[in-house]
Image (spheres, grey):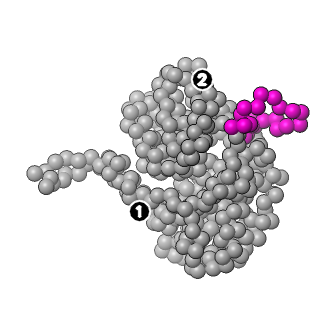
Amino acid sequence: MTYVHEIGLSDVISKLPDISPMQIEKDFPSLKEDLFLCALGFEDRCTWIPQLISKKGKYKCGEVIYFEYSTNPEDNEVNRIELVEALRTFSDVVTPMQCDSEDFAATLQQILTRLCQREEYPKVTFDISVCSSKLLLTVLKNLCQFKVELRLVYSEADIYHPTKDELGQTKKEPGEEKFGLTRGVSRVFPSREYPGWNLDALPEAIIAFATFSPDRTKAMIAYIDENLLQKPGDRVIWVIGKPHLEEDYWRIDHLVEVNEVSTQSQSFEVSTFDYKETLRTLHRIYKQYSSKYHLNITPLGSKMQCLGIALFCCMKPDVTIMFAPPVEYNASHYSEGCKATWVIEFGRLNDVLDVLGEVGVIRIEKKA
């Protein structure tokens, strides 16, 4: 007996790798990889993984690129010496690259093309610890266009601001920080790498990942349709980050409050640490709304949520990603320290994309 089966995300998601604790001796043995990517940022954890690797003295890499931001250059400079010193212990070629320049993607593609001409599947490690959502999504999209083996590594901050005590403060003394995690919105624009399309001229809707600095989200909602700020209806769908540690669950209620999440809008609590849960939730929203609206995403969630967004948009390229970089980050009030390091072994990226490409395929199968 045969039957028709449409492959769903639930049928293939188990084939995607899980996040696991990083073990330097196991994950960075005495072998040589082709490319190590990371970013120069102001957070303590900027140098954490490169320094851990450098202390073992076995891992080697053909070349390293560390990305530089146009925002907060003086704050970022604090970590440059330590970062570069650590990187040079495992590579003789350490190159900075401005990630906010117009030719950033083209330059990165040239490097990846060169590596792929030299090796069949060049091995790439990408430390995403201090990557902005824009940088993370841009690099992942470009990596997905090449036949590479990818490993993501991530250092988790020990303290994330704002803390519960800070939110409980009703007064600020003179001289204290004058803004939250970010200040202002430089501009709003659709991603070049994830432009999406709206061939049927459907009304616009937005999937908003809630953040502690809601001005950027509001700017992107207004960019889509200013009326949605007052009357969101079902055209603003909220994703509220659920921390993976129970003692941080208070953040959920605060995100709802500070973002003024309307009772008219649908919302989903989604793990900040399980990228597969983000992938599942976005797919669920897509199935519910894509025939009615053209969907836009504001990717202001966690690093793992951004990873889920990137993979989802590879699976559903009609969805548009919006960006709204801040004028400035509050370097003194972002995160502190590092309490854990993590790794995701993707292996050959084209195999991962092939797995996701199976979703929606109709098959004729035999029933036992």
Across the whole image, how many numbered discs are drawn on residues?
2
The residues tagged by marks 1 and 2 sit, at their Cα atoms, a distance apart of 41 Å
Does 251 sit above or below residue 88?
A: above
Q: Residue at x 78, y 35 (%)?
A: 179
Q: Is residue 120 in view from this perspective?
A: yes
Q: Position of residue 25 (x, y in %)?
A: 58, 74
Tag 2 residue: 229
Q: Nearer the viewer, residue 215 or 241?
A: 241
- State the mark number for residue 351: 1
* Amino acid beneath label 2: Leu
Q: State the residue lying farthest toward the right.
A: 174
Does 70 sit above or below residue 181?
A: below
Q: Residues within 10 Å of mark 1 (few under 14, many from 20)?
A: some
* Amino acid beneath label 1: Asp
Who comes first in sequence, dot 1 or dot 2? Answer: 2
Q: Residue at x 72, y 55 (%)?
A: 337
210 in magenta: no
Q: Which residues are magenta?
A: 164-192
Q: Position of residue 59 (x, y in %)?
A: 62, 77
Q: Is residue 330 left or right of residue 207?
A: right
Q: Is residue 259 left or right of residue 314?
A: right
Image quarter of the C terminus: bottom left
Q: Residue at x 76, y 71 (%)?
A: 85
Does 290 sit above or below residue 61?
A: above
180 in magenta: yes
Q: Is residue 283 left or right of residue 210?
A: left
Q: Position of residue 40 (x, y in %)?
A: 73, 58
Q: Is residue 207 in view from this perspective?
A: no
Q: Secondary structure at mark 1?
A: helix
Mark 1 touching mark 2, by CB under 8 A?
A: no
Q: State the residue lying farthest toward the front.
A: 247
